Amino acid sequence: MSKKEKTAGTKKATKPGKSKKPTEVVIVSSEAWPWVKTGGLADVAGALPRAMAQAGSKVRLFIPLYKSIDRKKFKIPAKGVKFSVPVSARIMEGSAYMIRPSKGLEVWFIEQEHYFGRDGVYLDHAGHDYPDNLERFAFFCRAVLETLLASGRPPDVIHCNDWQTGLIPAYLKTIYVGVPFFDKTGSLITIHNMGYQGRFHPSQWHLLGISWDHFHPGGLESYGHINLLKAGLIFADIITTVSPTYAKEIMEPDGGFGLDGLLRHRADRVHGVLNGIDMDEWNPATDKLIQSRFNHKEMKGKAECKAALCEELNLAPGDGPLLAVVSRLADGKGMELLAGCLKSILAKGGRFVLLGSGDKELERRFLKIASSSGARASVTIGYDERFSHRIQAGADILLVPSRYEPCGLTQMYALAYGTAPLVRATGGLNDTVRQFDLTTEEGNGFKYEEYSEAALLSKSLEAMEFYLAKREKWNKMVRMGMQEDNSWIHSAKMYHKLYRLAADLSD
Ligand code: ADP
Ligand code: GLC
């Protein structure tokens, strides 16, 4: 075991203190908006680097150059930096291309035709994980480190995100441990979702380039498999997750997906930092993707957005609330409960719009409900960024009934667009939504505890009744929600402190 590996367990100050800003920050992600997006990770990896750069750091963001990324549109240059990476017994060549989309920010695209020149990001056409995902992202992690080496500018910290980048902290403390260039580089990994850990069969170990000595339960092994998120959690100097409530939940068996013991063991390194939202992208006063613009003082535009949306979707006319979902139809999102009680919501006068994709059975169930709803419900299966803005602007209530939700961004977009979020009290939903109290007039939406169809239905009916009977109070509630500051400013400051701490811990 090297000197650095030992420091991962030693007790140094692990509370973010007052420290100067790290200047050289590297953020690594498998997706980032506006270049490539499959979910909230992209929103975070697109917005956080910009917020960091605005606060004075020099930030380099690394993402793979997938086939879907439009090189022309994003002005990605033809000339790049060449590098090579050993993958098992082969040497794989690649190139890195850089653009400067805003002040203080460089975005680096890692090109490798064999790994990233295909249609999907993680999944093939049939919706199955690519069988070589371990190899693809092991290559990506080493490619990032090789490109940094070639740059001659050592980073103070490398901020990794999710399992796809979990090998970077491991590489820094194993195969790159004697490399002086990275001597003062700290590492931080953010967990965006414990439900996705990057688990692979041990027969693929040879592709990692790490000694087999690390395949044991105190290392990269987890229940007989290679676990790439675990690699990051073991070796990173600092671990963050995307909300304070989720930071507690992942240390319990229910939320830890098998890694809660490790997280409890490293509890002094774990911090919950709430995600922000990008107020330039998600601002109803300037949003060009929506029908009419509006703000908390002038809400006429919101009514126009609702009317336009209902017309576009051919929804039956009515005065009732428009309830909405914009979500991956995936495990944990609570969509099976919603499918179970949606007919009762519609029967009570609600209208409904859903945009989402994922689980084929759920897709079928929602489409079936819509087709027999008498135009009270519209279901669109697919992924459509523009449509998601129009839904947020036109709806009255956004439903997020998740079983677990590390942070959740759509409820914060809803708040910004004067749409009341209705959420289950879990993870970041719990930290961002407060139940409205009719007496004190405090609160910004609707929140319930129990994970059940009955609880979701009862809260939905309560919200619908409130909308119909007390419109003035409703308007007051959503106007207050629109004025909340859920921007990245506060959390970016927190990350600055944690970056410094990670750099200190790496010494
Ligand atoms: P998760 O990352 O678990 O999917 P988040 O709430 O953090 O959940 O982020 C989801 C992001 O993906 C949001 O920006 C949301 O608007 C977007 N999104 C989800 N499904 C769709 C879809 N079908 N079309 C467009 N955007 C979507
Ligand atoms: C994950 C989580 C989601 C979170 C997003 C960004 O996809 O499921 O809750 O908001 O990452 O951190």
Image: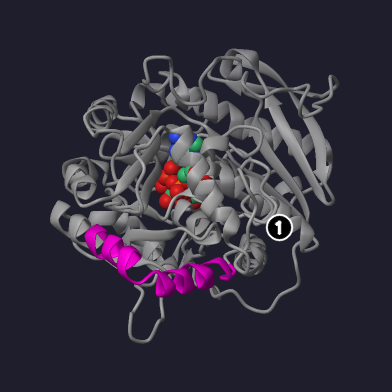
Colour convention: one colour
Comparing 216 with 153, the one in front is: 153
Label 1 packing within 10 angstroms: few (<14), some (14-19), many (20+): many
Comparing 452 with 414, the one in front is: 414
Kindly give the residue lying farthest to the left in the view shown.
Answer: 454
Q: Position of residue 387 (x, y in %)?
A: 52, 36
Mostly what secondary structure, the magenta segment?
helix
Q: Secondary structure at mark 1?
A: helix
What amino acid type should be assigned to the residue bearing mark 1?
A: Ala
Depicted 41 relative to depicted 36: above or below: below
Residue at position x 57%, y 36% from top?
A: 386
Q: Position of residue 504 (x, y in %)?
A: 66, 66
Residue at position x 39%, y 67% from top?
A: 445
Residue 243 left/right relative to 329: right
Quarter that holds the C terminus? bottom right
Depicted 209 relative to depicted 343: above or below: above
**Residue segment shown in magenta:** 460-485
Quarter residue 325 falls in = top left
Could one spot residue 219 in this view of the protein?
Answer: no
Residue with the mark numbered 1: 51
Comparing 336 with 77, the one in front is: 336
Residue 448 left/right relative to 20: left
Depicted 144 relative to depicted 427: above or below: above
Q: Position of residue 212 (x, y in %)?
A: 42, 32
